[in-house]
Amino acid sequence: MKLEKFSLGVGDRFAHQAKAQLRACMRAAERGVTVIPVWNKSNREHVTIGSEPSGTRAAADAAVQALRWPHPYRVDADHIRLETVDRFLPHSDFYTIDVADWIGQPAEAKSVQAFAGRHPELAGQISIPGIPRPFQTARADVERVAGKYLLAVQEAGKIYRHIVRLKGEGNFITEVSMDETDSPQTPPEMLVILAAIADEKIPIQTLAPKFTGRFNKGVDYVGDVARFEKEFSDDLAVIAFAVQQHGLPDTLKLSVHSGSDKFSIYAPMRRALARFHAGLHIKTAGTTWLEEVIGLAEAGGEGLALAREIYAQALDHLDELCAPYAAVIDIDPNQLPTAATVNGWSSEQFVAALRHDQKNPAFNPHLRQLTHVGYKIAAKMGRRYLDALEANEAVVARNVTDNLCERHLKPLFLNGTG
């Protein structure tokens, strides 16, 4: 099973927007660029909402059938670990293996030394096409990097082989997530990681490295855009080099996590992808949930009332909701309007505050981030929230489709195509 050149990881917290999400990919296809939808939902999200992986698969299959999507599509068991993967196995054909907890844990000294011995090519002067200057490494550098990442890659190998035993080799797509670490990987570090993945015989098709800057949920990138562009470009160069050096799949490409609304880095990413003729997997995560709330607010009446209620309850549970996402949000409580203020807002005022339009002075990134992590409030509402989505399907779906196509796919993949 191979993953196509461009793919979009789409989160759908409540499994109601698969058709709206797919319409965005259909618009891109009509403009000449095929972007494969990959529906992703993590174990944490399933636990929070009380859903099952079977629901994600059913929603994706139904959307593809209803809209007659002629291209492949995937369902991602997002951020799985050995203890959580089994519930996804009957329903997923894409596995994002999360080994964050193993990064930095020291591997056995003999394993590190054996790795360095197997890979003398990782030490010395290394020239990589696409990176302007060669870099010099010593065996001690290789051992230091292997000491940080080798145990994590070995854990990824265990998880991969567990999936193989139950699904069969070649019947799914594998991603390895290395983004939850303290600093961006340098090209020499990326080479070590990819060599270790090759040693584990993981047919990896996407790799999620760490990048500089803040990738906060649902808002724009915060950091040095020029530095990000260099890191992204260097990673593309290393991947192309490692594919040839280690016999990794020729479909291997970068995966960018928390890609939701990182508008300021989309143009640099597009330029780099064009230079290297490279593919990309980008995850948009929770933007669909935000567009649902925007759609409800825009609909007015009971929809607006429900959107106000979600915000008020999120405000009441601020610390509880933010704690699991502390590393990927920056919310200043002093910038959050009171529930009484929001209860007095019109549809237009609520939408202006929540929709990610940085040119609008009413846009409030603090309110947006709180709403992003507040999907647990809607989950507790149960059928009442789902009934509201269904009653306002047209306006909600329009927001979901427009957001994905116009704010994500178009700047990344459709520049100049209308």
Image (cartoon, rainbow, N blue to C red):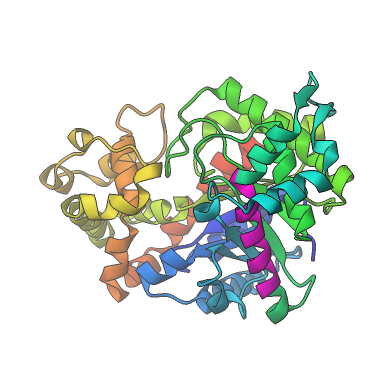
Residue 30 visible in the snapshot: no
Which residue is located at x 75 percent, y 59 percent? 200
From the viewer's perspective, is residue 182 above or below residue 66? above
Rendered-image quadrant of the N terminus? bottom right
Which residue is located at x 39 percent, y 43 percent? 327
The one nearer the camera, 393 or 53, is 53
The one nearer the camera, 378 or 41, is 41
**Residue 392 picture quarter:** bottom left
Which residue is located at x 22 percent, y 33 percent? 335
**Residue 63 picture quarter:** bottom right
Q: Which residues are magenta?
A: 148-162
In the figure, is residue 340 to the left or right of 180? left
The one nearer the camera, 192 or 248, is 192
Percent of width and height locating residue 160: 68, 67
From the viewer's perspective, is residue 178 above or below residue 227? below
Percent of width and height locating residue 263: 53, 33
Q: Main secondary structure of the magenta part?
A: helix
In the figure, is residue 148 to the left or right of 362? right
Magenta stretch holds residue 161 = yes
The one nearer the camera, 115 or 180, is 115
In the figure, is residue 172 to the left or right of 373? right
Magenta stretch holds residue 114 = no
How many marks can you see? 0
